[in-house]
Amino acid sequence: MTHRVLAIATVVAGLLSLNQGNAQAPKLSPPPQDKGLPYTHSARPRALEAIKGTTAIFVGGRYAYINGYKVRLDTKDILRSEAVLQEGKLYVPVAFASLITQKEFNPTPIPKDLITIADKWVYEVERTDVSLPTSVETITVDGKVYFSAADLAKSVGKQVLQTKRGLLL
């Protein structure tokens, strides 16, 4: 985001100088992916391929990637349902519990006329109510129940890998 703002500011400043009679062209900088940054938009397809076969949840995100498909953590409150990191555990809204416990993942297919925006599509998945085992820690965030995704995943026999940015199941 910082690089995008900087690039826009550079272009605007250059255009303003042209407008004032200065014939210098605006100084452009290379796109962020050419500056050696760890993740860029152009790296997205490769990153999604790397996490296929897993569920990836990221701290502060409102979405998870399940087998490479982008899904919402909570379909009822889509604007304020971010994954939260507390005391080293990643907590997600209770609405996401059924997606961790499901044996098969079958998202609703993207409509054929919208296939051109597939990389931005958020998939819908059938969700059922799940009773959380007592071994799964819960917290309340803004009046909503959140649960430890790692605790639930372990209780159903899934392998868990947690990093400071997120969680892979």
Image: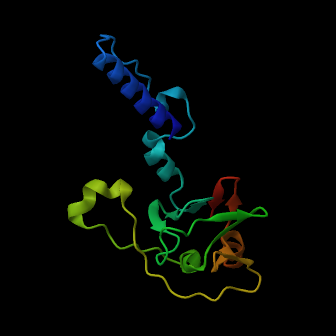
Q: Give residue 160's position: percent from left, percent from top.
A: 68, 64
Residue sitting at x 43%, y 76%: 125
Q: Would you place residue 164 above or below residue 133 in this image?
A: above
Answer with the quarter of the image where residue 14 lies. top left
Answer with the quarter of the image where residue 158 lies. bottom right
- List the single residue furthest toward the left: 113
Q: Nearer the viewer, residue 11 or 136?
A: 11
Q: Is 21 displayed left or right of 96 in the figure?
A: left
Q: Is 22 displayed left or right of 93 in the figure?
A: left
- List the single residue furthest toward the right: 87
Residue sitting at x 43%, y 81%: 126
Q: Would you place residue 68 above or below residue 156 in this image?
A: above
Q: Is 134 displayed left or right of 2 in the figure?
A: right
How many callouts does the rendering have? Answer: 0
Residue sitting at x 64%, y 80%: 143
Residue sitting at x 54%, y 68%: 80
Q: Give residue 118's position: percent from left, percent from top.
A: 33, 57
- List the single residue furthest toward the top: 23
Q: Give residue 54's position: percent from left, percent from top.
A: 56, 62
Q: Is 90 displayed left or right of 111 in the figure?
A: right
Q: Would you place residue 110 above or below residue 165 in this image?
A: below
- Tell me, what colour scheme is on the image? rainbow
Q: Quadrant of the C terminus?
A: bottom right
Q: Nearer the viewer, residue 23 or 159?
A: 23
Q: Would you place residue 90 above or below residue 131 in this image?
A: above
Q: Give residue 136's position: percent from left, percent from top.
A: 73, 79
